[in-house]
Amino acid sequence: MFEMSPKTFGAIAWGMVVVAAVVYVNNVIVLPSLRAPDGFGHFTYIWHMASTGSVPWATEGWSFFHPPLYYAFMASIWKMLPAVDPVVRLKIGTGIIAFLGIAQAGVAYLIVRRALPTNRVAQLLAVGLMLFLPLQLFTAGYLGNERLNAVFCGTSLLALLWLLDRPVWSRAAAFGVLLGLALLVKFTALAIVAGSFATLFLSFFFRRKFVLGLKVLTIVALAMFAVCGWYYTRNVDRYGTPFQLSRDTEMVQRVEHYQTKGKRNLLEYMLFDPLIITSPQWPRGIPIYGRLSPKIVRNSLRESVWTGVYTNAWFDGIGGQVIPNISQSSAAMRSGQIILALALVPTILVLVGICITIIRLWRDGWNDFYAAMLISFVAMMTVFVYGTKVVTLHAAIKATYLTPVGVIFALWLAIGFDAVCKVHKGTARGVVALCVMLAVASVAVFSLGAIVGRGYLRDGLEHRVWQNVYGIIEYAGGNKARAREMFERSASRDWHLGHENVAAMALKAGRTRKAVHHLRAAARLQPSQSFGLPEDRRQFDNATQAEYSTLLAVAYYRLGWSEAALRSATDAVARDRAIPEAEYNLGVLKLVESLSLPQGGPDRQALIEEARDHFQEGWELDPAFREAMAMKGAAEALLGDCDRARSSFERADEVAPDRARSYPLATGTGDLHTAGIHRRLRIRDIPPQLTSRVQRRSCLAMAG
């Protein structure tokens, strides 16, 4: 029906790639990197790997649970360009990942060509979906591992087809390496792994090639495990599961408890809300944060899962992430209505393509190509449904979670369109016209900052919260003067974390009185700036105030204000018994206070015993806190118990100096709401007679 020469096809396809590339570059430049969902958490992971050279533990930070490949790549870019502005470094890495995403269009073309070798328009539609799907456009500038995950998963699906064509050991090994790399990017690659192994097993089973199948599966598994096994074994050793998340930590639970949730009943998976086209924000009329008023209309139709996926794939469905919220911008409202209406066409074709594939397999029997695609697709949907059942948050309905099978969606679209071509040529022409209109609208709306929401992303950077976190990026990149400027601007707008970071830099520069001033301001402002459910908020406020009291104790000690330091350290421990440095500092201050009491007296002995117990508590909170155990030994030596002191010194010596602490001291956790650069400071300038070095020597002399 659509006659097209290879030259014309190539010109159109490459033209589409160029247009997409231009939009990607624009979006990488215009979109502030940290506006991506969990963007600050992703940056902190990158910073951690760049500064320590090690993979963090899953529960130590907001986004630290992700496998490390994406972050290792971004950290290498960060370290290779030390003279480049830190924000630009992030954008360079993000831009490279965005361009890698174009590979998905190539993979989709190669896969669709297998099924429809003569339907060039169907092939172009598949390529267009991978290039111009709004999700692909507006996430090009996102900091995060989703795009790289999609690239490895899509490439793995193509490699699976090549392996099925010719099941030799070299292809099996290469395929296993690809799967291993995908699993080192994101856990959701597990769906592709499961689908691939199931396809290979069934293919060899139906061919009755059992020995060959066993060999191929073994080679794939060994190659995959050789690439990613170290990481998942590491998780099992520490957590008892290969797929440890950070959701059980207090920092994540506080936010999730404050987010609205769906019921995730059967109807939420069966229904689709057609009115989302008139009001393109999901869930329609329901906020994703805070307590819901009884007056808000809630039902399974409004909160249906697939409506959320549809809206977030074809538009900024949550609202306000990359373009203004529909309640604030009529242009955003109209754009969403147009795009979501037009998007019904390719969505229906996708559903038609799925049905045709199922019918073909049912009617014609096993087919490696269609079975591989359908089984992998079902595996991905199973993982997605399971995840949304476990995490019922509205904010967790992200279309990006389905990008590992994006090329399969492109195949379903092409198959659906091919069926329309065979039924009615005029309808097929109309479909093409509507899809072109959809692509044009998507490019127009999601060329960020160009038409819809001009200045929206730029203006947001003047907010005190963003000034603080971008100050942290500048600080991490070595641009201390710029970091101080941004922290001070944030503090001038009374943001408690801005004050905290001004104080942190002042402490580091030896300007202790200035640090005290800003720490007191941070402590005063913080309770009125926190959020969460009452119990979560109370716990968070106590923990944050304990952090500030710990820092104040260090500052007061440096100023020689011993009583104030002791009060602050005592307050920190009373508020939160989970901070090792708080216990350590209180122990040190009690040892210092003991020097003013008569030697051998009961009051002095009691203080030293209390100090010893604080050091022990600090050690138990973090067994990598070697200084706490060393000071416990010093306290025991001061009590005259050199046998126990020697045991404590030996235990401290067993801890490698470079062993990672349970709290990531170099970077913080990546929680946007605790974005401080130097928490968990400990007192260092201890009177010589109290140090572990002197007390160790004293015990050695007594033994001699």
Image (cartoon, rainbow, N blue to C red):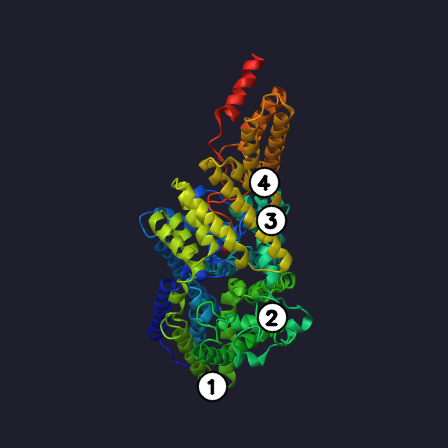
State the residue position of label 2: 305
| Disc 1 secondary structure class | helix
Q: Earlier in the sequence, mark 2 or mark 4?
A: 2
One can see residue 166 in this view: yes
State the residue position of label 1: 425
Q: Nearer the viewer, mark 4 or mark 3?
A: 4
State the residue position of label 3: 242
State the residue position of label 4: 570
Residue 132, compared with residue 676, is above or below; it is below
Tell me the amino acid under the disc marked 1.
Answer: Lys
Q: Earlier in the sequence, mark 2 or mark 3?
A: 3
Q: Are marks 4 and 3 in contact (CB under 8 Å)?
A: no
Which of the two residues, 699 or 575, is positioned nearer the viewer here? 575
Which of the two residues, 87 or 77, is positioned nearer the viewer here? 87
| Disc 2 secondary structure class | helix
Label 1, label 2: how far apart the Cα atoms are? 34 Å
Label 2, label 4: how far apart the Cα atoms are? 49 Å
- In which quarter of the view is residue 331 placed? bottom left
| Disc 3 secondary structure class | loop
Q: Earlier in the sequence, mark 1 or mark 4?
A: 1
